[in-house]
Amino acid sequence: MTATEASDQAPTSMNNRQILQAMSGLMAGMFVAILAGTVVANALPRIIADLGGSQSAYTWVVTSELLAMTATVPLWGKLSDLYNKKLLLQLSLGMFVVGSLLAGFSQGIELLIFSRVMQGIGAGGLTALAQVVMAAVIPPRRLGKYAGMFGAVFAVGTVAGPLVGGVMVDTSWLGWRWCFFIGVPFALLAIVLLQRTLRLPTVRRDVKIDYLGAFLIVAGVSAILIWTSLAGNQFDWASWQTAALTGGGVLLLVAAVAVEARVPEPIIPLDIFRNRTVTLTTIASLLVGVAMFGGTVFLSQYFQIALGKSPTVAGLMGLPMILGLLVASTIAGQIISATGKWKIYLVAGGIIMTAGLALLATIDANTGFGLLSLYMAILGIGVGLLMQNLVLAAQNDVPASELGAATSVLSFFRSMGGTIGTSVLGAILANRVASEMAKSLGTEGEAAGGSSHAVPDMTKLPAPMREIVENAYGLATAELFLVATPFAALALLAVVFIKEKPLKTTSGMERLAEEAKQAVADGDKPSSPTPVS
């Protein structure tokens, strides 16, 4: 393995002003990724009804992006350990722009789902690389302070998305297509800001990317996630399709492990799991993904169908959860930076998130907004304390040369958990709604979308039918949170066993330079950071 020459000009640390300048492009990129998911949330019922889609299509529009993001995160993370992180970020933003334009011009469900895949690939790069870059320029001890800023961006994007999406859907001269077009200028702005503000050393190594391992990982994960998306809806859980997809997925993943164990530069270094902190934070991230994404992605549908609210009002109703997340993540980040103590916030987050999901499992079509707000705020506080600090714990406990791999592993498993949760709980929702409709209407339920799993257009239903549909979606949504609660409890169990270690006071760039010097002292020839503008 041949290293490029290190430059004397290679930066190893940045002051606060330089960090803030560099983060401007990162925050714009993250805002785009968040906006892509949230701006569509309240528009989906209208989009699916307009394009003649089913409940399965509703789930696939969400799942396809998560699937593409999940499957590509490890590859993005590995590339960040080898090549120019800024160029990779810009490439991911470019793919996001292409996906957004395709989605906005979609005339059918098939093209819309394909465009969401393109958006997901771009979002996978943003998800993995933004946190890698943060770890490269900010020491773990100071990371909480800046993570609070990202928390604010997350909150603004999450709050603004449903509101903007709702307004666009409710405005006749705009329409739902602008839910996709609106992210394009922000993505282009992020590309320009990254070009002007981000200065990072990159590690260029003469290595071959493990394309076979990447293919096997993507194919295996995709097979499993496609099974979870279709089982119980397009075919029975116990069927030959289930056997083919699960058996094929497992075989592909076993082959991936065999390949990854032998190649010099694996996409997911298996020895990283020898680190107890990485293993436990990975398990917790997977479970948080199932509980959080799976439990909350259908809230907008609940607001609009079970409670009969407009898309704009549905966007406003999600504010308590977002405000809880924003306050918790910001305050916890400041305290962690000041004290260096972080485990207590992971444990508290696990307890509060579990309680929030359990409370939301009691809702129905008649639950008042006051109680709903309280339950959502509790869930948001738990997620705010837990999610970002899992990444902090893992990044603090790995060598700088493995920051990309460790960060992408956590993002990968969190996204995989979210995709599995969305798919499985979406199938449960569709089946429970069909069951409740059949109980109330018998064969007439098909007319309202019961056994066909169609998403009903509430504006076209007569009052008696609308009441039955509202009740069915209320009961089904509560069941989703009930199913998600045990996963949150298991995440709490995982974080309890994480050992708290002091937060490092040097950035990833500084640690990488120290590791390079130590390797030279030990007689090795490491790859060296080379400045790339």
Image (tube, rainbow, N blue to C red):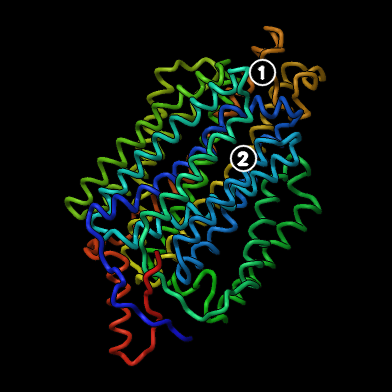
* Residue type highlighted by circle 1: Val
Dot 1, crowdedness within 10 Å: few (<14), some or many (≥20)? many
Quickly name the residue at label 1: 469
Q: Residue farthest to the top?
A: 463
Residue 140, quarter of the rendered image = bottom left
Q: Is residue 384 left or right of residue 298?
A: left
Q: Note whether 388 is above or below 171 in the view shown.
A: below
Rendered view: 328 above or below 281: above
Is 480 situated left or right of 15 in this image? right
- Mark 1 secondary-structure assignment: helix
Q: Is residue 147 visible?
A: yes
Q: Residue at x 61, y 68 (%)?
A: 214
Is residue 85 shown above or below 240?
Answer: below
The residue that mark 2 highlights is 62
Category of crowding for the residue at label 2, using alpha-carbon neighbours closer than 10 angstroms: few (below 14), some (14–19), many (at least 20)? many
Of mark 2 and mark 1, the one earlier in the sequence is 2
* Percent coordinates x, y for residue 422 in the rendering: 59, 41
Residue that appears at 76% across and 35% down = 108
Q: CA distance from mark 2 to mark 1?
A: 22 Å
Q: Secondary structure at mark 2?
A: helix
| Residue 516 vs residue 202, the one in the foreground | 202
In the rendered image, which quarter contains the C terminus? bottom left
